């Protein structure tokens, strides 16, 4: 199982970041579901025939979705809304970053997962569809609606993707 | 701030806690063991209820699984050939000295099919075994031919049986199990003048045995699919069966055996990253368009990409698959425009990846690690239409002219 241990050591940080966004900024939950996913991969490692990272991403998306269901659709541990600095700089960047996580946390789980996989993990529409077990059409529509919703939620801190 | 940038900024300081890797490994081991114990307990309970006796597992318990092939009569045109069957069983047993994970081979192996093939007699064998990780018996199924075990599969819970074995000179003999479905096969795809491929499909005949033998060299590009309906001539989206040889090397992070490049580079000066560019590369688009054939083996697809904005505003993704170069062309709004097949890839040759773009847009040429064209662009360049030779040089050395 040395190769599995190598995989955990090498890829856990990147996977934690994906999990964090999938959980709408709840770090504790992200670490919990990542550990749970990796532990379940231990027993299946030799049977995983796709890329282990792709397998882990799919499992993380499912785990985040299940967690969302268990929490009765409540937003997940939203970040405290801080005062918006008046001058732009490092502080502004921090606010933007927190705001994007907060906005992500308010999206429906599939919409959030699509945005995270497409824009954070750089997956194509086809790869995202395969990861989430849905059609490419769904990915397209969720991307479009998700981006529009993000604009609404971000208010003045308008994000760009062009 | 861009969405990706914002997401990256939001996660930049995140890392797993110290000891996380050790916790995962220990937890994984514990969970795995617990699962196996609970499965054993459940089976023991059910068996106890059924038989009315208290079941205590003992190493001498008979190994049994529910695979009906264990008790099926031997089929195939060599079913009555005791010599071939006994020889195959000898080979099968002789290779069971220290196979990974399998700890108990004490149950008898059973031949469920024996037949003639162009590469000699072939015998399909099934055997219940015990593996190190679980006390629950598992089914081992495999094929013996040319005096060796061609392949064997341990059938794990919830995992589909591959059911295809390839062997013989030039790997030209295929023994395929239908597994209660229909297997369709095809070979020698034909590319039409419009650049689109087509394949003729045939249903495998098994004569009621569930096993078929197909002899065809690998250069004929045979494809097998298990399906309830016959694939259309222009259908390249079915899931092809993969033999042992088609799976990549054990473990992750192994280098690709094609050109071996593993980077994504630009061939155009314009290198805008906007959301559409991330979706402007899809093998399914190319297969749906009939330009790209089935990718049967894990290694059929290269791990590099050349991207370029074209003079007419479209976007091209150039990649390697099935030993050939392809360009997938997308409109600026992200929708697929068309696919083009390019040169065969030839490792070691100069400019081993070339694709002539449509509409006189030029030719994408790539040679990672080299400087290409009059401006000595790194790795890739779009040679204008009409270019007949391209300069290729090392970063600090002379250049050579390569005809294209």
Image: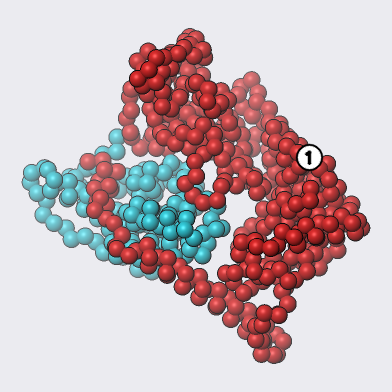
Q: Residue at position x 29%, y 63% from top?
A: B18
How many residues crowd mark 1 within 10 Å: few (<14), some (14–19), many (20+)?
A: some
Letter of the chain in red: B
Which residue is nearer to you in this view: B348 or B221? B348
User: Residue B188 location, x and y as percent?
Assistant: 71, 31
**Is B26 located above or below residue B367 in the figure?**
below
Q: Position of residue B152 (x, y in %)?
A: 69, 56
Q: Residue pushed farthest left?
A: A86
Q: Is residue B74 above or below residue B403?
A: below
The residue under the point 46% across, 16% down is B362
Q: Looking at the image, which residue is at 64% across and 37% down?
A: B235
Residue B171 visible in the picture: yes
Eyeballing the image, is A138 above or below B124? Answer: above
Residue B240: horizontal and vertical position, in percent? 64, 44
The scheme the figure's colours follow is by chain
Chain in cyan in the render: A
Q: What residue is shown at x 57% (from left), y 69% (from top)?
A: B133
Residue B211 visible somewhere in the drawing: no
Circle 1 — which element? strand
Taking the image as shown, residue A55 lies to the left or right of residue B61, namely left
- Above or below for B90 versus B60: above
Identify the image quadrant of residue A124.
Answer: top left
Q: Position of residue B2 (x, y in %)?
A: 26, 40
**Closest to the observer, A12 or A92:** A12
Subunit under mark 1: B
Q: Is residue B381 left or right of residue B19?
A: right
Quarter of the N terminus of chain B within the rendering:
top left
Observer-nearest of A153 and B222: B222
Give the total number of marks visible in the rendering: 1
Q: Residue furthest bottom?
A: B53
Question: Which residue is denoted by mark 1 in the rendering?
Answer: B215
């Amino acid at each position: 199982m040395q190769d599995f241990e190598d995989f955990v050591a090498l890829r856990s940080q990147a996977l934690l970041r994906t999990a964090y966004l999938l959980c709408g900024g709840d770090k504790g939950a992200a670490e919990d579901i990542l550990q749970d996913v990796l532990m379940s991969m231990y027993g299946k490692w030799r049977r995983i025939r796709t890329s282990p990272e792709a397998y882990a991403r799919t499992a993380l998306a499912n785990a985040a979705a299940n967690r969302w269901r268990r929490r009765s659709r409540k937003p997940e541990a939203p970040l405290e809304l801080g005062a918006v600095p008046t001058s732009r700089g490092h502080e502004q960047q921090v606010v933007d970053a927190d705001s994007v996580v907060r906005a992500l946390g308010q999206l429906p789980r599939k919409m959030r997962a699509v945005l995270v996989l497409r824009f954070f993990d750089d997956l194509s529409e086809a790869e995202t569809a395969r990861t989430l077990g849905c059609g490419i059409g769904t990915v397209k529509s969720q991307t479009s609606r998700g981006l529009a919703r993000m604009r609404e939620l971000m208010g003045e801190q308008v994000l760009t993707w062009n | 701030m861009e969405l990706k940038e914002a997401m990256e900024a939001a996660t930049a300081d995140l890392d797993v806690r110290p000891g996380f890797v050790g916790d995962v490994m220990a937890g994984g081991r514990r969970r795995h063991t617990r699962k196996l114990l609970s499965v054993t307990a459940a089976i023991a309970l059910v068996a106890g209820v059924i038989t009315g006796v208290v079941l205590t597992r003992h190493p001498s318990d008979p190994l049994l699984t529910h695979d009906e092939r264990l008790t099926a009569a031997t089929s195939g045109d060599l079913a009555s050939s005791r010599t071939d069957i006994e020889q195959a069983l000898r080979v099968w047993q002789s290779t069971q000295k220290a196979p990974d994970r399998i700890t108990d081979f004490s149950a008898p192996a059973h031949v469920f099919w024996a037949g003639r093939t162009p590469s000699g007699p072939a015998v399909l064998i099934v055997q219940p075994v015990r593996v190190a990780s679980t006390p629950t018996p598992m089914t081992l199924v495999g094929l013996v031919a040319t005096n060796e075990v061609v392949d064997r599969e341990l059938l794990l819970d919830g995992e589909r049986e591959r059911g295809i074995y390839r062997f013989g000179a030039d790997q030209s003999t295929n023994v395929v199990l239908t597994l209660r479905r229909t297997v369709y096969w095809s070979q020698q795809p034909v590319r039409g003048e419009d650049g689109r491929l087509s394949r003729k499909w045939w249903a495998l005949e098994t004569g009621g045995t569930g096993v078929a033998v197909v002899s065809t060299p690998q250069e004929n590009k045979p494809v097998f699919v298990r399906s309830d309906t016959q694939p259309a001539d222009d259908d390249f989206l079915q899931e092809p069966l993969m033999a042992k040889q088609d799976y990549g090397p054990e473990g992750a992070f192994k280098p690709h055996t094609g050109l071996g490049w593993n980077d994504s580079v630009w061939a155009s000066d314009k290198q805008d990253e906007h959301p559409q560019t991330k979706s402007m590369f899809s093998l399914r688009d190319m297969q749906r368009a009939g330009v790209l054939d089935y990718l049967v083996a894990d290694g059929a697809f290269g791990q590099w990409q050349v991207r370029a904005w074209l003079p007419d505003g479209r976007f091209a993704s150039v990649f390697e698959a099935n030993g050939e170069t392809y360009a997938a062309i997308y409109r600026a709004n992200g929708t697929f425009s068309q696919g083009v097949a390019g040169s065969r890839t030839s490792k070691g040759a100069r400019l081993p990846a070339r694709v002539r773009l449509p509409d006189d847009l030029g030719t994408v040429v790539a040679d990672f690690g080299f400087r290409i064209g009059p401006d000595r662009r790194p790795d890739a360049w779009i040679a204008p239409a009409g270019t007949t030779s391209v300069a290729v040089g090392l970063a600090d050395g002379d250049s050579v002219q390569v005809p294209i």
